[in-house]
Image (spheres, rainbow, N blue to C red):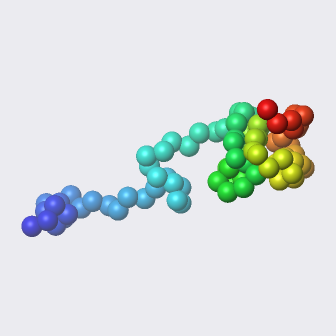
Amino acid sequence: MSTAAAAGAAGGEREPHVPPHPGVSKLYTPVHIAGRCALITGASSGIGYATAERLAELGCRLVITARRLDRLELLARRLEDEYGACGSRGSGRRV
């Protein structure tokens, strides 16, 4: 007899796991991050870009870096306009 069948037979049926919020694992505790500062590298595309968007949406202050300065400046402008997330821009100089 399987464990689930044994539990059911003993009267102790297990209920299916339901996460606290849709799509959230019970392994992760929600943390409020609004107002925190995040450094994101590779923000001009891909995962870095998506991370910058999501953290800005959640209210983080951002420091974003990337090799492609033109794309980085567009992202910084958009995040500042929509979320106020990248308020002061650096010089954009390559080091």
Q: Nearer the viewer, residue 86 or 12?
A: 86
Q: Position of residue 23 (x, y in %)?
A: 52, 59
Query: Looking at the picture, does residue 65 appear above or below residue 50?
Result: above
Q: Quadrant of residue 32?
A: top right
> Quick check: can you spot residue 56?
no
In the image, what residue occupies the spot 82% across and 42% down? 85
Query: Looking at the picture, does residue 11 appear above or below residue 32?
Result: below
Q: Position of residue 84 (x, y in %)?
A: 86, 43
Query: Looking at the picture, does residue 25 appear above or below residue 86?
Result: below
Give the total of numbered labels. Answer: 0
Q: Position of residue 37 (x, y in %)?
A: 72, 33
* Horizontal side, residue 2 vs residue 73: left or right: left
Q: Position of residue 35 (x, y in %)?
A: 74, 34
Q: Quadrant of residue 10?
A: bottom left
In the image, what residue occupies the spot 70% across and 36% down? 39
* Horizontal side, residue 73 vs residue 5: left or right: right
In which quadrant is the C terminus drawn?
top right
In which quadrant is the N terminus drawn?
bottom left
Q: Nearer the viewer, residue 7 or 91?
A: 91
> Quick check: can you spot residue 39?
yes
In the image, what residue occupies the spot 73% across and 48% down? 43
* Horizontal side, residue 40 vs residue 4: left or right: right
